[in-house]
Amino acid sequence: MNISDVAKKAGVSVATVSRVLNNSSSVTQKTVKKVQDAIDTLNYKPNIAGRNLRINKTNNILVIVNSLVNTFFSKLIKGIEDTAFEKGYNVLICTTDNSPEKMMHYLDLLGKKLADGAILLGIEADGANKARIRKISESVPLVQCSERIDDSIPYIAINSFKAMYDVTDALIKSGRKRILYISADNSLFSTEQRFDGYKTALSDNGIKFDSKLVIYGNYGYRTALQITDNFLKKKIKIDAVAAVGDRMAYGALNALKNNGFKIPEDISVFGFDNIDLCHMSSPTLSSVNQNQQIIGSKAMETLFAMINDEPYEMETITDYELIFRESTNI
Amino acid sequence: MNISDVAKKAGVSVATVSRVLNNSSSVTQKTVKKVQDAIDTLNYKPNIAGRNLRINKTNNILVIVNSLVNTFFSKLIKGIEDTAFEKGYNVLICTTDNSPEKMMHYLDLLGKKLADGAILLGIEADGANKARIRKISESVPLVQCSERIDDSIPYIAINSFKAMYDVTDALIKSGRKRILYISADNSLFSTEQRFDGYKTALSDNGIKFDSKLVIYGNYGYRTALQITDNFLKKKIKIDAVAAVGDRMAYGALNALKNNGFKIPEDISVFGFDNIDLCHMSSPTLSSVNQNQQIIGSKAMETLFAMINDEPYEMETITDYELIFRESTNI
DNA sequence: ATACAAAATGTAAACCATTACATTATTGTT
DNA sequence: AACAATAATGTAATGGTTTACATTTTGTAT
């Protein structure tokens, strides 16, 4: 059952039916009604593949993300989805499990016209893949979100440097001087930026950076628990912890508790990302909140503008806020 | 740039190129090479819309879910996605925000051949929509996952009745008799089933069901905190809490703490779903773990079988396990 | 009533890949 | 060497929509 069946039923040409379908100009109310009636009685639904083929557009976008099981990203995707929905786009989710092959496989789908563009969410890429991605971005609309791969691709995120600067500064202003910094062992732009923020805040406050106060985890709870515990064995004195992720902050927090420290009296703990847990745990965890919904929405808007050859920003920096809770005495 | 450009370049017909593309039978190694070379030099990618139109298949599936921002569902989706990937399918995520209109809108896309089938994830539907869904399921492969809408549609989930029976029974066996049951104020199949499990376990252990020991929330933390607090004001004695969700369990737990109760000495708390938080909080929370990955995978396998007219199960019941942690003294 | 402009509708080509059927090339048999 | 059988390739139709261009209808002015 296709458009010409409808045309026959309505006693008009397929062109007219198509015009009604796309409510394009110049078609009489009377014929609109005839056609609409035919559509209704036949319960006709236009075939998307035919349409896509003809207009060379899919109204799909790809979201390429390492993992969905991370509320940071799933909230971001909600932002993307809501805006996509408004604009009539559908969202294909592609999770890569950190596999570059899987990521490149998905990007390949763009060339096959499975989607009109893609949003790269927190994606990391090494030299070779970076070059391939840049190449792809020349022919297909691409947006990078919350993590930076290449300067030639529009970018949406918070200012990671400033956020961690603010955290460190706030801890220092509350009287803390020896701040254990828990970073992640990757080469992500944001990781680097945050580390710079930490170091700069120290130096701006006249505190000498001490590399012994930096340990590296993998964003997970267990590892953070472990490495903090190991660190504490060294008996190096600290009075605060700043972590690049909440899970890591919790790992540290529990390691500290296990070692008899009081939070926040002895040691303040600051997380990053403000996951749900932060306000449910005891003590509740101070953290940096980003508005993922807005980031996602902006990303989708940028992509939409690219797809439609409208002007767009190469860089969109969104807001964040520090949320002070029981794990700090600020 | 299309298949006939490749054909021209390779000096063969489009049919041969197509055969190479689909590595179908009877094409000489020599021509395969010629064609492959042409494909490579032209960097040709077959157009999916053209292909979809011709073969009347998209290799897309829809996942319709209320919210992604819920690790229960995002883990499930990971299971779906992994299996979909193996089978060469792409996953379109449609979040409905509990809006039946949005859900029906997405189901409508199936009729337009946007996808070959759909998985309904934890979706609720009232009379009218239930009928529409059943209708749709007659012409399009549909699977319902973790929540039951209609018996005519294949269903994958744990046995909710038995899971809550086991929780209640375990609490009773550990010496608890007055178990506050925190349910959700919806009419979901699983909600009903769990409640039955609770009541049956009580009666099987010779404990009379007391409707004063049942309160209703909305799966959220704050509401649970509130309603538990309200309940405690009544000074009704309890020695355990069983909640239909972990967030609710945490709300109860914190309300109990605030009211001076010791967990688990005074009151045991049991959650449901085993969210990440469970092993990071203090006390750690006892909970029911489902293997979402497997549920998702089974759902996708069932859908795949339906799409390909292979035999499939109408009901797939997956395993769960009770995880005992610090919030109970079992 | 006529001429003409503007509005409404129709015709047919185009988008791209797959595949039934037709044709040509190859191999093996006698 | 001739022929049959089989393998390899080619031709052309098909799927459903959109749209440039052609044609018809409607409306307006004289």
Image (cartoon, coloured by chain):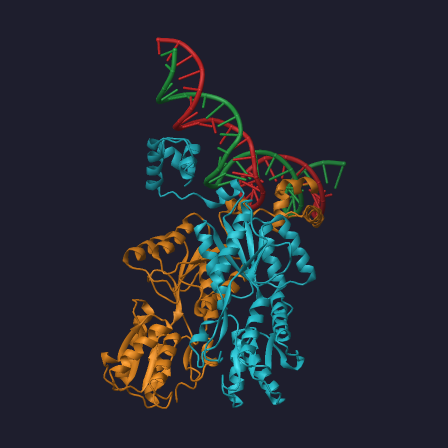
Chain colours: A orange, B cyan, C green, D red
Q: B236 above or below D30?
A: below
Vertical placement of residue B108 versus B40, above or below = below
Residue A191 coordinates in the image, percent (x, y): 32, 71
Which quadrant would the N terminus of chain B be assigned to in this image? Answer: top left
In the rendered image, residue B232, in percent from the top left (x then y), is placed at: 59, 87
Identify whether A12 is placed above or below B100: above
Left or right, B209 with reference to A268: right
Residue B112: percent from left, percent from top:
58, 49
Task: Give A268 or A47, whichever is nearer the viewer.
Answer: A268
Observer able to see residue A120: yes
Could you tell me if residue A308 is visible in this image?
Answer: no
- What is the x, y in percent for residue A277? 46, 77
Q: Please state the total of marks drawn on the protein image.
A: 0
Residue B100 lies in quadrant: bottom right
Left or right: B43 with respect to D23?
A: left
Toward the viewer: A21 or B180? Answer: B180
**Nearer to me, A174 or B91:** B91
Nearest the eye: B66 or D13: B66
Q: Is residue C3 above or below residue B216?
A: above
Q: Quadrant of residue A306?
A: bottom left
